[in-house]
């Protein structure tokens, strides 16, 4: 079964922000209820999953975060707008930590706990591509249709080939049908965890593109100052202990520190 691509999942999180009811949940109310609610997709590994042995790094991180705040975790599984309208969640994870990007959302951002973006995946044995300047003559580069990376590559005359999922792009790179693919580090790490015989490596071809690099934060729905402070304090504790990085690593993802 296909999973959401990383960029599609970011769009999903933005939809959560726009359609989740704007009900304020101050820390006192969260404490009284004994639980804090995460909104997550039921079929989006490595991010989240309702069924199976693995529930995704967002669910595991949310559980650790809730414990650090001193409450239990509730997970509301949401896949479409009509579900989100009933979800009544308190937060999402991996929100883009940019107030401008969240200008139309109802999310208040925590302090960042990591970073992500877009990089170029090539086969581990590829010694021909070392940077952006090598792409024009490298062959076809896989992209997600309509993405910022696709636009940038097109503007520089790079021959691109689209696919709907990052995993499909990486399969084509592994098969030699693509010279590389513009994907997230998350996609590369999770792919390598399940494809040890055909590993990918990342080439930092988009490091200077601001729109293709971002910090990650907890996106909180209309909190009071006390809840923001509690979540920030919990993040400090979890980051210092290496807990969040270790959770992501279980899915093959090397979570980079905030930029």
Image (cartoon, grey):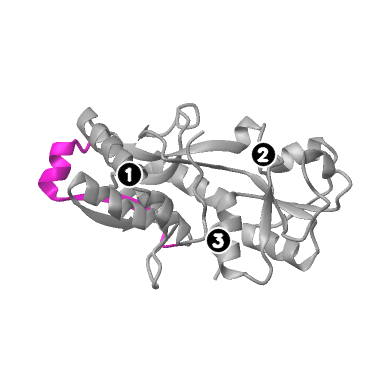
Q: Which residues are magenta?
A: 24-43
Q: CA distance from mark 2 to mark 3?
A: 22 Å
**Place of residue 225 in the rendered image (x, y in percent of width and height, measured from the top left):** 23, 28
* Mark 2 residue element: helix
Is 83 on the left-hand or right-hand side of 45? left
Q: Is residue 194 above or below residue 113?
A: below
The quarter of the picture where the N terminus appears is: bottom right
Residue found at the very far left of the displayed protein:
32
Q: Which residue is mark 1?
A: 91
Give the x, y percent position of residue 230: 23, 37
Between the C-alphas of marks 3 and 1, the distance is: 24 Å
Q: 201 or 73: nearer the eye?
A: 201
Q: Residue 147 is drawn in which quadrant? A: top right
Query: In percent of the image, x 69 and y 59: which residue is there?
Result: 169
User: Which residue corresponds to mark 3?
Assistant: 190
Question: Which of the 4 quarters of the picture holds residue 170?
Answer: bottom right
């Amino acid at each position: 079964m296909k999973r959401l691509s990383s960029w599609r999942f970011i769009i999903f999180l933005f939809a959560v922000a726009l359609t989740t009811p704007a009900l304020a949940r101050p820390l006192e109310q969260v404490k009284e209820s004994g639980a804090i609610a995460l909104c997550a997709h039921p079929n989006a590994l490595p991010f989240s999953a309702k069924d199976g042995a693995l529930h995704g790094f967002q669910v595991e991180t949310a559980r650790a975060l809730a414990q650090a705040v001193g409450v239990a975790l509730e997970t509301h599984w949401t896949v479409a707008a009509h579900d989100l309208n009933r979800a009544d969640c308190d937060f999402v994870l991996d929100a883009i930590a940019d107030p401008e990007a969240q200008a139309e959302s109802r999310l208040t951002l925590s302090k960042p706990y990591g970073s992500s973006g877009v990089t170029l995946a090539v086969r581990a044995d590829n010694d021909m591509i070392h940077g952006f300047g090598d792409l024009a003559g490298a062959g076809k580069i896989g992209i997600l249709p309509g993405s910022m990376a696709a636009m940038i590559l097109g503007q520089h005359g790079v021959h691109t080939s689209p696919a709907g999922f990052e995993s499909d792009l990486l399969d084509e790179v592994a098969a030699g049908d693509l010279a590389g693919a513009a994907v997230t580090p998350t996609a590369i790490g999770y792919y390598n965890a399940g494809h040890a015989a055909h590993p990918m490596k990342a080439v930092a071809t988009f490091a200077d593109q601001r729109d293709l690099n971002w910090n990650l934060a907890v996106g909180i729905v209309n909190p009071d100052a006390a809840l923001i402070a509690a979540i920030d304090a919990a993040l400090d504790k979890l980051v210092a202990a290496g807990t969040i990085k270790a959770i992501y690593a279980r899915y093959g993802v090397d979570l980079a520190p905030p930029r």
